[in-house]
Image (cartoon, grey):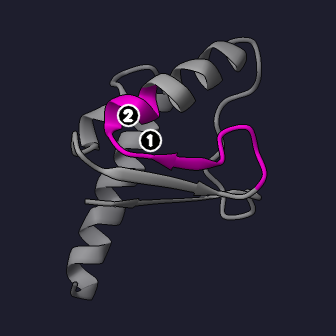
Amino acid sequence: MSNAQTDNHRRIAVAAFGAWQRGEAPITEIFAPQMTWRIEGHSAASGQYRSTQEFVDRVLAPSGRASSTASRFDPSPSARSTLTATP
């Protein structure tokens, strides 16, 4: 993948996370239905998810309920877990 493609994907992801944080659009709009998600680390969400729906059901929905009264999601690079997704 070229640097231009990587930069474009980054802009799309940053815009999508921003819209999600503002409550304007679901973050799942940029997810491919059959992606495999792997969250590395030692959090409750760590593991592998074989579809967007499984990821939504087991990670996003529960964390959304838990954080409804907490501070906004911060996708900072200092997070202890690493999320990777492969098509």
| Type of amino acid under label 1 | Phe
Which residue does the numbered mark 1 point to in the structure image? 17
Residue stretch in magenta:
42-56
Q: Is residue 48 magenta?
A: yes
Neighbor class of circle 2 (other Cα within 10 Å; few <14, some 14-19, many 20+) is: some
What is the quadrant of the N terminus in the image? bottom left
Q: Which residue is at 22% across, 87% downward?
A: 2
Relative placement, left or right, of 57 versus 36 is right
Dividing the picture into quadrants, the one containing residue 49 is top left
Relative placement, left or right, of 86 versus 62 is left
Q: CA distance from mark 1 to mark 2?
A: 6 Å
What is the quadrant of the C terminus in the image? bottom left
Q: Which residue is at 36% across, 52% downward?
A: 36
86 w.r.t. 12: above or below: below
Q: Which residue is at 78% across, 52% downward?
A: 42
Q: Secondary structure at mark 2?
A: helix
Where residue 8 sits: x, y (%)? 25, 67
Relative placement, left or right, of 74 versus 60 is right
Residue in front for this viewpoint, 30 or 42: 42
Which residue does the numbered mark 2 point to in the structure image? 27
| Discs 1/2, front | 2
| Type of amino acid under label 2 | Ile
Residue in front for this viewpoint, 1 or 20: 1
Find out whether the residues at labels 1 and 2 contact each other: C-beta distance under 8 Å.
yes
Q: Is residue 44 magenta?
A: yes
